[in-house]
Image (cartoon, grey):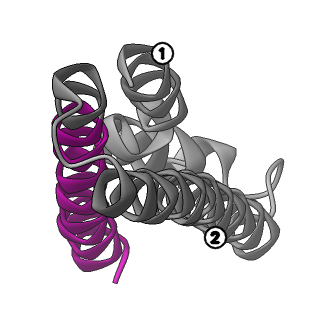
Amino acid sequence: FLLIQELLRVMRTIDDRIVHELNTTIPTASFVGKVDPGQTCKELYESLMDAHTNRERIIKNCISQTSAVVKTLKEEREKAQEDAALLKQLRKEQTKLKLMQSELNVEEVVNDRSWKVLS
């Protein structure tokens, strides 16, 4: 899970720097003729969309995989009620699943913040 968090942190750089990106994207009066602000804004918008889509896909994929592991462990747990190691592994996976689900909520907040700045 820590690797996923680190990957998401790196992938969220564009969102963290959105104000800077906008300031460097929109040309000042002296550069208006040299840079197409419409094209530059379009590229920034597309980069932001790609980043959001990729991060959401990664998070949902992790949630799906972890959910499958939790389901399997629950089924095994029903068969072996007294297996403490199995219970420990199930709790660990359930915690990881909750963390990933909360990461999806964080992603929504980050995305909303970026779109508000951009619009």
Tell me the CA gap for discs 1 and 2.
23 Å
Q: Confirm whether the magenta stretch covers residue 106.
A: yes
Question: Where residue 1 sits in the image (x, y, percent)?
Answer: 39, 25
**Which quarter of the figure has residue 39?**
bottom right
Horizontal relation, residue 30 to residue 71: left or right: right
> Mark 2 falls on what kind of element?
helix
Mark 2 — residue? Answer: 49
Instruction: Name which residue type carries label 1.
Output: Leu
Point 49% across, 47% down: residue: 28
Point 43% across, 53% down: residue: 76
Front in this rendered view, residue 68 or 63: 68
Q: Tell me the magenta residue range.
A: 90-119
Report the number of discs: 2
Mark 1 or 2, which is nearer the eye? Answer: 1
Image vertical order of residue 4 relative to residue 15, above or below: above
Mark 1 — residue? Answer: 3
> Mark 1 falls on what kind of element?
helix
Point 20% across, 45% down: residue: 99
**Which quarter of the figure has residue 88?**
top left
Prevailing SS of the magenta stretch:
helix
Front in this rendered view, residue 61 or 69: 69
Q: Residues within 10 Å of mark 2 (few under 14, many from 20)?
A: few
Question: Where residue 85 sits in the image (x, y, percent)?
Answer: 25, 20
